Image (tube, rainbow, N blue to C red):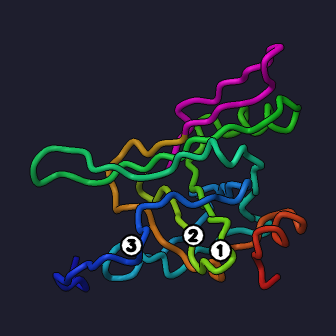
Amino acid sequence: MPGYSFVSVPKSGNNPGMPSGKKNIVILFDMDKATMTRDEKGVTVSALTMVGTGTTPIGLFVDQKSIDAGDEVEGDVYSRGFLHHVNFDHPGTELAIAEFKANNVNANLGAIVIGCDPSETTAKVYGTPCAPLTMQAGNEQDTSEAHNNHFELKTELRTYPAGIIAKSAIPATDNADINTFLGLGGV
């Protein structure tokens, strides 16, 4: 990357690998109606805007312990890149989640996962305009054991690593209560 200098990456604290909790809302947006800008080093998302009147991200309630999001290196020599994935379970089998599945099974999506720690000022963005997330699984379980939907979103093309975005740069969703819970839109 043109803006990157080869620099040391020291230990970032006493427990850098300790897992951290996530908010129980995953933000999803239509990548075809978004513009995203990354800085010259390819990781920091410096701008994320929704294009079109009334276009906003949505917040999807999830079982926070089921969130599995990340990126992985894939490809042959000199053509390696990153594949993103965001997997989660939505408790419930109500009409709204069935409608979400039916209308987004072939959509190009982006996802934002926000940590629980209120001192965190950034979140992770998965999917890019040229390598959006697509629904690889949207499996309903409606049994005597559980009522839920398991989702697996994944990029099919290689791209940059998962983006890091300032919470203040995340567009507000269509729901005021979710925005307040996540601290979006200057709330």
For residue 152, above or below residue 180: above
Q: Earlier in the sequence, mark 3 or mark 2?
A: 3
Q: Is residue 58 magenta?
A: no
Q: Earlier in the sequence, mark 2 or mark 1?
A: 2
Report helix, strand or loop for mark 3. Answer: loop
Depth order, front residue of 80/180: 180
Depth order, front residue of 174/93: 93
Q: Residue at x 55, y 70 (%)?
A: 35
Would residue 74 appear left or right of 127 to someone viewing this image? left
Closer to the eye: label 3 or 2: 2
Q: Residue at x 57, y 80 (%)?
A: 166
Question: To which residue does mark 2 refer?
Answer: 123
Question: To which residue does mark 1 refer?
Answer: 170
**Within 10 angstroms of label 3, few (less than 14), some, or many (20 or more) residues?**
some
Tell me where residue 164 appears, x and y as whole percent.
Answer: 48, 72
Mark 3 and mark 1: Cα distance apart in space? 15 Å
Image disc number at residue 43:
3
Mark 2 and mark 1 in contact? Answer it, CB < 8 Å.
yes
The span picked out in magenta is 133-152
Tell me where residue 172 appears, x and y as whole percent.
Answer: 76, 72
Would residue 42 appear left or right of 37 to someone viewing this image? left
Report helix, strand or loop for mark 1. Answer: loop
For residue 112, above or below residue 63: below
